[in-house]
Image (spheres, rainbow, N blue to C red):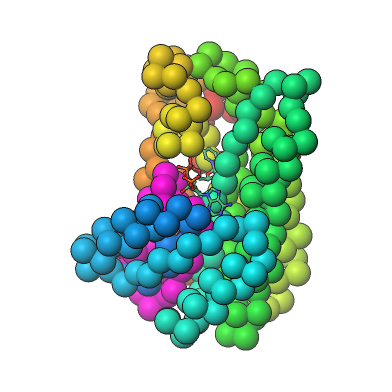
Amino acid sequence: MRLKGRVAIVTGAGSGLGKAIAERCASEGASIVIADMNQGAVDATVKELQAAGHQAMGFKVNVTSRAQLKELMQATEDKFGKIDILVNSAGITRNRPFKEMNDEDWDIVLGVDLKGTFFAVQAVADYMIKHRYGKVLNISSLGGLGVGGHAVGGSPGGSSNYQAAKAGVIQLTKTLARELGPHGINVNSVAPGFILTPMTSTTRTPEEVKEHMAVRTKTCVLNRAGTPQDIANAVLFLVSEESSFISGQTLLVDGGRTDKI
Ligand code: NAP
């Protein structure tokens, strides 16, 4: 049990990668807070975790609201007595070619994916500082490292807003690692390659999904598509004691893209 006795909040845990991360951390003994803006998904995920014998509570939160994040942190401390781990997985896309991208597309993606991450870490910081212990894990993206994730078959338009936000998450991770490190807090990031989740499937037609999966399999040296469990395993390492001397890093988990290595 690599997280026995630990308390972990996972934002965006009602779906996709966040849900897989929550399940993996729970399987290693952590008490889990499912924090997501989708109430139905929160309730269903908590139910599943509890049915599997894990400690879990749900909290409906929009990560663009400082006030709601403040309530989330206090509710977690009230229930479990501390907060050891925060995984920021809540995220959205609004893809559109650059010349057609409007203020709303730009603001909402930067607001959730970058500012939401900043707000959540700011809200949790004092809870971790007072125990001189904390693991913050931000979900960036291969796109944040400058790889044109959408320039291949089966992809919906441009993603200048998303890629800028995810690049920001990588730099934010480094800055927060410097500022929070002296308080015993590690801050790292995982940058997933393409993984089939509701985010990536609902923005494509079934034919585009098929085409994109084929491209992603062919352009990966391991010759397979990634799974949410692949990402959850990397996250588990970075929020466990096994990575206690690692901070400020972004771990690319993409199966070895042939256009990258
Ligand atoms: P997903 O299946 O859509 O899950 C994201 C979850 O976050 C959903 O439950 C969503 O709720 C929730 N959410 C959205 N906006 C929120 C907000 N403002 N406050 C709180 N919760 C919010 O997506 P995913 O694929 O798991 O993505 C998880 C993270 O991985 C994201 O940060 C994404 O950018 C990143 N990522 C994904 C991939 C990939 O290939 N899947 C690759 C690289 C990076 P609703 O369902 O109600 O919107």
Q: Residue at x 54, y 65 (%)?
A: 86
Looking at this view, is 82 or 170 the one in front?
Answer: 82
Q: Is residue 165 above or below residue 39?
A: above
Q: Is residue 176 magenta?
A: no
Magenta residues, start to end: 1-28
Residue 202 drawn at (x, y percent) = 45, 30
Locate the C terminus by quadrant. top right
Residue at x 67% of width, y 24% of height: 96
Horizontal and vertical percent position of residue 118: 69, 59
Front in this rendered view, residue 190 or 157: 157
Quarter holding the N terminus? bottom left
- Within the image, what quadrant is residue 160 found in? top right
* Image spot of residue 72 (x, y percent): 53, 71
**Residue 25 visible in the snapshot:** yes
Q: Is residue 24 left or right of residue 50?
A: right
Residue at the spot x=38%, y=62% of the render?
A: 25
